[in-house]
């Protein structure tokens, strides 16, 4: 699990976590979602980190 910090004007306004995930494509990485308030408004937030080159290669013989 990783922690993601959200900042506005260099001030921390939120922290969320992203858990390890194997995506439907087979790629590996991290994914997290939640809600955050900025000033008087609330936002839905998603973060996705995908490891480049992590998608399994297809076997051409299959």
Image (spheres, rainbow, N blue to C red):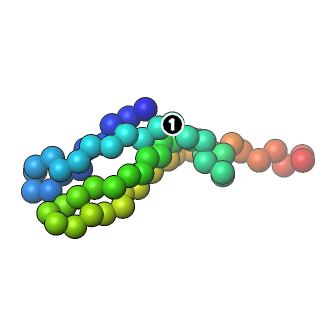
Q: Which residue is mark 1?
A: 20
Residue 49 in view of the camera: no
Residue 4 horizontal side relative to residue 40, left or right: right
Question: Where does the image place residue 12, in percent across and percent down from the top left?
Answer: 15, 47
Give above or below for 31 relative to 38: above
Identified at 90% across, 47% down, the residue is 62
The spot of residue 2 in percent (x, y) is 38, 35
Q: Position of residue 40 (x, y in %)?
A: 16, 66
Residue 40 relative to residue 55: left or right: left
* Number of numbered labels in the structure image: 1
Q: Nearer the viewer, residue 17 or 30?
A: 17
Name the residue at the top extreme: 1
Classify the position of the N terminus by image quarter: top left
Q: Locate residue 54: give its quadrant.
A: top right
**Residue at 84 percent of width and 49 percent of height:** 60
Q: Residue furthest right?
A: 62
Q: Nearer the viewer, residue 60 or 20?
A: 20
Is label 1 in a helix, a strand or a loop?
strand
What residue appears at the point 9 percent right and 56 percent down from the top-left corner? 9
> Is residue 34 left or right of 60 when viewed as pictured?
left
């Amino acid at each position: 699990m990783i922690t993601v910090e959200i900042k506005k004007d260099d001030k921390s306004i939120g922290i969320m976590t992203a858990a390890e995930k194997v995506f439907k494509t087979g790629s590996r990485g991290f994914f997290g979602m939640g809600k955050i308030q900025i000033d008087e408004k609330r936002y839905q937030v998603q973060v996705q980190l995908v490891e480049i080159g992590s998608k399994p290669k297809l076997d051409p013989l299959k």
